[in-house]
Image (cartoon, coloured by chain):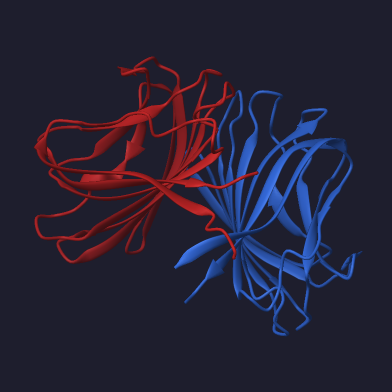
């Protein structure tokens, strides 16, 4: 019987919290991870890597993004940032949000790469956000945190590992 | 929906890697994840060709539409008559592998194969977004693919997953 290649590692459900720490979700068992999140919050959010319960808040994050909203399309790049973007809160009250986050190599001692895609609804308008992010240090991380720019978070985050040998 | 691993290859310093018999009638669509370093560094593109019975399709039947973003500049362009799917930029260093996501639709079915390709760079300098929508012009059936750098050798890991729809 064929073996499932997408392995559910953990799910965190939360309500009214100031941050969400997902620890011990990255390991040597997997190289790539897919994170599916459904978060409702009042502002943009950030992603930071974590190791042994500590958050990596150094100026070691960089990204390139494309934002598209109606006929508007805009791009931007950041270096020396202390986080990657996470558009989890990019929705009105009652709006819908979906963000897919790919992590590559977070646990291995090589530089971590992320790829994220977000579909959000603001006052009935569908908007999109795509990001490629890289971390400048070749460290090992076993988790990540999601922090809102303001307010609190409610929702859920699921982490899946992609089977290799 | 489940993702079923149908192929994998781990390789070191090779000029090309082929994964055969990873596409079949069991699945329509596939996701291919790769983590690749090109040597020497400097941005040798990673070219993917479809294969059938162990032979690359190197014809000029590959095309793509691409979306690129560099800081605040966003550009698009279209290429036809190529001999490969562009599936990576190779802007990698030994501990900074490039992460690429290749969604491949209907490679085994006798209809035109299409692809959505996302490139996750991890450069030492500027970072970019390069996303491609690609298509093959012929309604052929393929059971595998190859990855070849435009120059140099590649080291890395490629894993293929079939999308189980029911």
Image quarter of residue B77: bottom right
Q: Split into 4 quadrants, where in the image is the N terminus of chain A?
A: bottom right
Measured as percent of width and height from the top left, residue B120 is found at 57, 42
Camera-side residue of A82 and B7: B7
Using residue A115 as the reference point, say whether residue A15 is left or right of it.
left
Residue appearing at x 78%, y 53% in the figure: B47
For the residue pair A64 and A71, the one nearer the viewer reads as A64
Residue A44, visible in the rendered structure: yes
- Answer with left or right where residue B90 lies relative to residue B20: left
> Would you say A82 lies left or right of A124 here?
right
Q: Nearer the viewer, residue A100 or A61?
A: A100
Q: Is residue A104 above or below residue B147?
A: above
Residue nearest the observer in this picture, B62 or B71: B62
Percent x, y for residue B87?
Answer: 69, 52
Q: How many marks?
A: 0
Residue B81 found in image quarter:
bottom right
Q: Is residue A54 above or below residue B159?
A: above
Quadrant into which the C terminus of chain A falls: top right
Q: In x, y percent, where is residue B23? A: 71, 69
Where residue B142 sits in the image (x, y, percent)? 78, 73
Residue at 32% across, 64% down: A70
Location of residue B29 with respect to B86 vertically, above or below: below
Q: Is residue B89 visible?
A: no
**Chain A drawn colour:** red
Q: Residue at x 19, y 53 (%)?
A: A91
Tell me which chain appears blue: B
């Amino acid at each position: 019987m064929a073996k499932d290649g997408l392995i559910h590692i953990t799910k965190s459900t939360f309500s009214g919290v100031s941050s969400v720490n997902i620890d011990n979700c990255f390991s040597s068992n997997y190289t790539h991870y897919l994170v599916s999140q459904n978060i409702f919050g009042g502002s943009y959010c950030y992603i930071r890597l974590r190791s042994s319960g500590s958050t990596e808040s150094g100026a070691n994050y960089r990204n390139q993004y494309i934002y598209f909203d109606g006929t508007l399309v805009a791009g931007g790049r950041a270096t020396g940032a202390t986080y990657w973007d996470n558009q989890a809160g990019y929705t009105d009250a009652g709006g819908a949000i979906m963000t897919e986050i790919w992590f590559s190599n977070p646990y291995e001692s090589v530089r971590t790469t992320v790829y994220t895609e977000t579909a959000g609804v603001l006052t009935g308008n569908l908007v999109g956000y795509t990001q490629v992010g890289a971390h400048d240090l070749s460290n090992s991380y076993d988790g990540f945190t999601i922090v809102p720019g303001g307010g609190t978070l409610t929702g859920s985050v699921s982490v899946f590992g992609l089977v290799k040998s | 929906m489940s993702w079923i691993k149908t192929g994998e290859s781990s390789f070191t310093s090779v000029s090309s890697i082929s994964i055969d018999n990873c596409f079949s009638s069991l699945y329509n669509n596939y996701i291919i994840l790769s983590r690749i370093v090109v040597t020497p560094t400097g941005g040798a593109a990673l070219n993917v060709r479809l294969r059938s019975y162990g032979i690359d399709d190197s014809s000029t039947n590959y095309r793509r539409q691409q979306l690129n973003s560099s800081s605040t500049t966003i550009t698009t362009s279209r290429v036809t008559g190529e001999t490969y799917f562009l599936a990576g930029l190779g802007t990698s260093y030994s501990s900074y592998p490039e992460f690429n996501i290749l969604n491949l639709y209907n490679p085994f079915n006798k209809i035109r194969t299409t692809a959505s390709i996302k490139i996750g760079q991890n450069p030492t300098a500027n970072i970019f977004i390069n996303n491609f929508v690609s298509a093959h012009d012929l309604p052929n059936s393929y059971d595998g693919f190859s990855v070849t750098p435009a120059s140099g050798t590649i080291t890395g890991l490629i894993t293929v997953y079939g999308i189980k729809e029911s």
